[in-house]
């Protein structure tokens, strides 16, 4: 396999050795994402609320999957195209594939993933590479997936909440605590927000809590002011503590 070390130097090592020693979540892409003429969305950077760093992104479909992974509490690291796998097929022809996404899990294992815009994207070459990726990941206890495109409503809801993922929307622990307390029992969004104070001030804190899962709404249905908001997976006290150390340290980072 191949990857780029810090400073851009290309490295080749045996896959089973490299997978357990290299922190791919900290590496830059081994090659730039291609720019496709005529596409409405091209390569860019996604600011990760999980890591406080930018992740290279190559398409709208990939950006959507980054949103999902960035909210997943089991994910602690993300990177775009940090490695390329090299192998020979049955005819001894050299083959290679660069998975679009790398995600590190809390248990130290990882997910390699591609983000096709539709099920047949990439053709036979992509499907053949997917089989090889699955075998390679099985060797080291990882997993590989071709992530299915998101439902349009879910994608739209995540895009909206992502606009409030940055810690600047949780700079007052007292306001965060009040928002979480207001939704200690399920109630419509606007009712809980108005119970805390001025919606202009309170809504960003509520959306920030929804992004991080400290509050919960049915994301498969369109968001609106009367949507039913419920407590998230953490208690109010835990939710306030969960974001504070990391968020305050990364509070000056920019969001695209």
Image (cartoon, grey):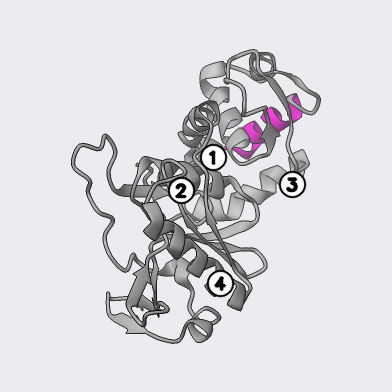
Mark toward the start of the polypeptide (4 vs 1): 4
Badge 4: few (under 14), some or many (20 or more) residues near its Cα, within 10 Å?
A: some
Circle 3 Cα neighbour tier, 10 Å, few/some/many (<14 / 14–19 / ≥20): few
Residue under the point 61% across and 49% down: 72
Residue 229: mark = none
**Quadrant in which the C terminus appears:** top left
Looking at the rendered structure, the secondary structure element under dot 1 is loop
Query: How many residues crowd around disc 2 within 10 Å: few (fewer than 14), some, or many (20 or more)?
Result: some
| Residue 85 pos. (x, y %) | 41, 73
For the point 55% across and 66% down, which residue is it? 134
Label 3: which secondary element:
helix
Lateral position of residue 130 relative to residue 141, left or right: left
Closer mark to the observer between disc 1 and disc 3: 3
Q: Position of residue 182 (x, y in %)?
A: 73, 24
- Tell me how far mark 1 sits from mark 3, CA to CA: 16 Å
Marking on residue 135: 4
Q: Is residue 57 above or below residue 190?
A: below
Q: Which mark is residue 171?
A: 1
The disc placed on residue 251 is 2
Task: Report, in whole angstroms, how far the alpha carbon at label 4 lies from the one at label 3.
Answer: 39 Å
Along the viewing direction, whichever of 223 and 244 lies nearer the viewer: 223
Measured Cα–Cα span from mark 4 to mark 1: 45 Å
The reply to whether the magenta stretch includes residue 72 is no
Q: Is residue 9 visible?
A: yes
Tag 2 secondary structure:
loop
Examine the structure image and report whether residue 175 is included in the region drawn in magenta: yes
- Highlighted magenta segment, given as a residue range: 172-182
Which circle, 4 or 3, is nearer the viewer?
4
Circles 4 and 1, Cβ within 8 Å, touching? The answer is: no
Q: Which residue is mark 3?
A: 238
- Judged from this view, the residue extending furthest toward the front is 91
């Amino acid at each position: 396999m191949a990857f780029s070390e810090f400073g851009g130097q290309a490295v080749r090592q045996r896959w089973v050795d490299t997978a357990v020693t290299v922190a791919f979540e900290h590496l830059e892409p081994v090659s730039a994402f291609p720019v496709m003429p005529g596409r409405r969305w091209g390569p860019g950077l996604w600011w990760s609320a999980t890591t406080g760093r930018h992740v290279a992104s190559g398409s709208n479909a990939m950006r959507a999957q980054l949103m999902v992974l960035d909210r997943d509490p089991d994910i602690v690291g993300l990177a775009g195209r940090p490695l390329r796998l090299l192998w020979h097929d049955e005819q001894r022809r050299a083959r290679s594939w660069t998975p679009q996404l790398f995600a590190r899990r809390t248990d130290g294992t990882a997910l390699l993933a591609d983000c096709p815009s539709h099920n047949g994207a990439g053709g036979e070459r992509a499907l053949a590479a997917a089989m090889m990726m699955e075998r390679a990941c099985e060797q080291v206890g990882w997993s590989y997936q071709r992530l299915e495109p998101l439902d349009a409503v879910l994608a739209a809801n995540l895009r909206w909440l992502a606009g409030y993922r940055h810690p600047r929307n949780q700079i007052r622990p007292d306001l965060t605590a009040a928002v979480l307390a207001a939704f200690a029992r399920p109630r419509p969004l606007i009712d809980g927000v108005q119970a805390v104070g001025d919606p202009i001030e309170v809504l960003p804190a509520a959306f920030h809590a929804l992004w991080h899962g400290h509050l919960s709404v049915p994301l498969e249905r369109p968001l609106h002011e009367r949507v039913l908001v419920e407590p998230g997976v953490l208690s109010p006290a835990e939710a306030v503590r969960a974001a504070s150390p990391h968020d305050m340290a990364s509070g000056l980072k920019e969001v695209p």
